[in-house]
Amino acid sequence: MPPARRRPSGSKRGGRPPAGPQGRAAGRAPGTRTPPPPRPGSARAKVERRSAVHLAYLTRLPRFLPFVVMLALALVAIFISGPAGGVAWFVVAAFLAWLAYFSWPALTPPARVLRIVAVGIVIAAGVITFGK
């Protein structure tokens, strides 16, 4: 019978290195950093406080559901021209902008540019569709 192998201390099953100074922090997406806390009484703190209920509701939903709803709205906007399609695009843009607002302090500059471009493209699609 071959001798049992011992794992080095601190290693986990699956062969992944432990998170720490060398690895990425657990739970943090690439391209993000730890944001400073908002100042009390600031506009950001007020928006965060008012949106907390809605964000808590979103976290209780199945993870795929907000994506499916936004995808359905985008498909409606693609296939229906005129004001109804434009409004669907604007709802998608508002949701993307709302999420971008909350993630903004934690994003790196390239990730911020990507969020601005994405919201801008959706708004442009809404303007074009609304005018048809």
Image (cartoon, grey):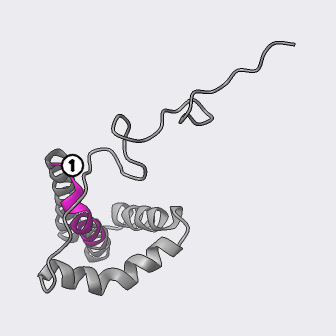
Q: Is residue 68 left or right of residue 33?
A: right
Task: Characterize the magenta stretch by its predominant secondary structure.
Answer: helix
**Residue type at the position of mark 1:** Ala
Q: Quadrant of the C terminus?
A: bottom left
Q: Which residue is mark 1?
A: 111
| Residue at x 52% of width, y 74% of height | 60
Residue 73 position in % (x across, y down): 40, 68
Q: Check the image and report above or below for 46 versus 6.
A: below
Q: How many marks?
A: 1
Question: Residue 49 at x, y = what percent?
Answer: 28, 85
Q: Quadrant of residue 120?
A: bottom left
Q: Residue furthest top?
A: 2
Residue at image x 58%, y 37%?
12
Q: Position of residue 79 (x, y in %)?
A: 38, 62
Q: Nearer the viewer, residue 21 or 113?
A: 21
On the rendered image, what quadrant is the N terminus found in?
top right
Q: Which contiguous range is marked in magenta?
A: 94-108
Task: Find out whether residue 95 is within the magenta segment.
Answer: yes
Secondary structure type for disc 1: helix
Q: Residue at x 45, y 67 (%)?
A: 66
Q: Is residue 91 above or below residue 114?
A: below
User: For residue 61: magenta?
Assistant: no
